[in-house]
Amino acid sequence: MDAAPLYEVFSSIQGEATRVGERHLFVRLAGCDLECAYCDTPASRKTPLCCRAHFPAGVEEIPNPLAPATLDAVVRRLDEEAGPHHALSITGGEPLLFVDYLRPLARGWRERLPVLLETGGHRPAELERMLDAVDIVMADIKIASSAGEANATPLDTVRAFLALAARKECAVKVVVSQRTTAGEVAEIAALAHETAPDAPFILQPVEGARFGPPTGDHLLALQSACLRIHPAVRVIPQTHKAIHVR
Ligand code: SF4
C-alpha cells in the first residue's frame, strides 16, 4: 500500500484498559467500517485533508494520504521530541483496514518500542496477517446494547479473533451502557475465558453516547455476573478524559 489516510499522531497518556497510565505515542488512522453508537472519535471515520502531527512545539498539518516514509519520519521525530514512551499505540478508526501499509512500519517501530494495536474484534483474517508486527492486542468487542445492533460482532468471529490475539499480550474490553444485561456480557466473558484465558476482561462504562452509562449498582451487577465465569474482570473507565488529555 503506497499511502494511507491518517487522522493524527500525538504523544499522550494511555487512558484505557490494562496499559492505563503509560505514556504512549499514538498513531490514529482515519477510516472505519463500523458506526458504533458510542464512538468517541467519529471524525476519524472519515479522511481529513491533513493529518495533524502534535509536536511539542506545535501542530503540523501533513496532507493526506501519507506515504509510509512520511509517517515513519513523524513517529521517529515525535518519539525523540516528546518521549520517552512506554509503547506505540496504533488506533483509529479501524487500523486493520490498513494491514499492508501498517505491517512493515510496525515491524520497524518494534525495534524502538512495544507496539500496541487497538482494534475491534471483527477482523480476524487481518489480525492474523498483522500479528507478527505487534506486541499487544487490545480488542474492543462490540455488543448490541452499547455499539448498536448493526455493529455487534458475531460470537464466532469474536472466538476466531481472540484465539489469535491470545498469542500476544492481550486484553478484552467491552463497552457497557445502561441497556447492557448481565447475560450479554457474561456470554462474552465466557467466550474470552475459553479462548484467551490469560487476558484480563475489562468492562468500560460508556461516556457521552446515544445509550447512557450504567449506574454504579448496574456496573457492580455486570462485574459480578462476569466474575462468576472469568477470574480477571475489571471495571476501568476512560481515564484520559478525567485528566483532560487527548
Ligand atoms: S470501531 Fe472505533 S472508530 Fe469505528 S465507529 Fe466504532 S468506536 Fe468509532
Image (tube, helix red, strand yellow):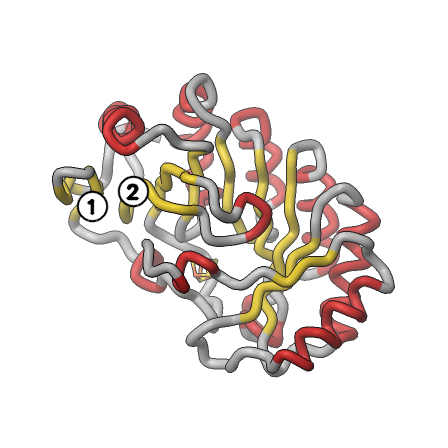
Q: Residue beneath label 1, please?
A: 52
Would residue 65 be found to the left or right of residue 235 on screen?
left
Decide which of 21, 54 is in the foreground and name it.
21
* Label 2: how many Cα within 10 Å (few below 14, some 14–19, many 20+): many
Decide which of 244, 28 is in the foreground and name it.
244
Residue at image x 51%, y 40%?
117
Q: Is mark 1 within 8 Å of ligand 1?
A: no
Would residue 72 be found to the left or right of residue 130 on screen?
left
Would residue 165 be found to the left or right of residue 56 on screen?
right
Would residue 88 be found to the left or right of residue 233 on screen?
left
Percent across and percent down for residue 197 are 80, 44
Secondary structure found at label 2: strand
Residue at image x 65%, y 41%?
170
Percent across and percent down for residue 232 are 76, 52
- Asked if disc 1 and disc 2 are in contact, CB closer than 8 Å, the reply is yes
Q: Residue beneath label 2, please?
A: 10
Q: CA distance from mark 1 to mark 2?
A: 8 Å
Decide which of 42, 215 is in the foreground and name it.
215
Residue at image x 32%, y 30%?
83
Residue at image x 65%, y 35%?
169
Any part of residue 69 in sight? yes
Going by the numbered disc 1, the residue's amino acid type is: Arg
Q: Locate the C terminus and report the quarter of the image it occupies.
A: bottom left
Any part of residue 129 in sight? no
Residue 20 is tagged as: none
Decide which of 124, 147 is in the foreground and name it.
147
Reply above or below: 229 against 104.
Answer: below
* Label 1: how many Cα within 10 Å (few below 14, some 14–19, many 20+): many
Going by the numbered disc 2, the residue's amino acid type is: Phe
